[in-house]
Image (cartoon, grey):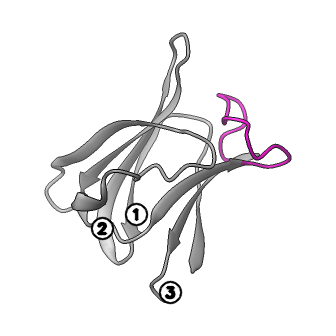
Amino acid sequence: MTTFLIPLKNVPQSFEISLAGVPYLMTVKWNDAFEGGWVLDLADAINNLPIVAGIPFVTGANLLDGLEYLGINGQLIIYTDGDQTAVPTLENLGIEGNLYFLTDEAA
């Protein structure tokens, strides 16, 4: 298994990223609501068509669980340094709260 750290900042952001060799547009934004938090959208990077939207950052879980039909060959996992169960906050995303892509494919 190969693990890649996806470099995030603690501000809303959109950027192109290759996951298992497929280009995507990843958007990460803060949902400022009760029980809100960081959410993830993925779009096709070539034509900017949405693929999936509003995936909440659930610590330790595969954010792509249940979405295998999309054909993304890997897992997106959130962890917070020092507390593997803590959800990334508005302030610590990209500092202590990190997003990783895990794949069986060779880099």
Q: Secondary structure at mark 2?
A: strand
Magenta extent: 80-94
Q: Nearer the viewer, residue 98 or 102?
A: 102
Question: What amino acid type is highlighted by mark number 1?
Answer: Ile
Q: Nearer the viewer, residue 63 or 94?
A: 63
Q: Which mark is residue 23?
A: 2
Q: Secondary structure at mark 1?
A: strand
Callout 2 touching callout 1 (CB < 8 Å):
yes
Mark 2 crowdedness (10 Å alpha carbons): few <14, some 14-19, many ≥20: some
Report x, y in % for residue 80: 74, 45
Q: How far apart, in angstroms, are the residues tagged by discs 3 and 2?
A: 15 Å
Report x, y in % for residue 11: 56, 34
Q: How far apart, in angstroms, are the residues tagged by discs 1 and 3?
A: 14 Å
- Name the residue rendered at 18%, 51% in the picture: 48
Disc nearer the start of the sequence (3/2)? 2
Q: Nearer the viewer, residue 25 or 35?
A: 35
Mark 3 crowdedness (10 Å alpha carbons): few <14, some 14-19, many ≥20: few
- Name the residue rendered at 45%, 85% in the picture: 105
Q: Vertical placement of 51 versus 93: above or below?
A: below
Q: Which mark is residue 17?
A: 1
Callout 3 touching callout 2 (CB < 8 Å):
no
Residue 37: quadrant of the picture:
top right
Residue 18: quadrant of the picture:
bottom left
Q: Which residue is mark 3?
A: 107
- The secondary structure making up most of the magenta span is loop
Q: Secondary structure at mark 3?
A: loop
Q: Nearer the viewer, residue 13 or 20?
A: 20
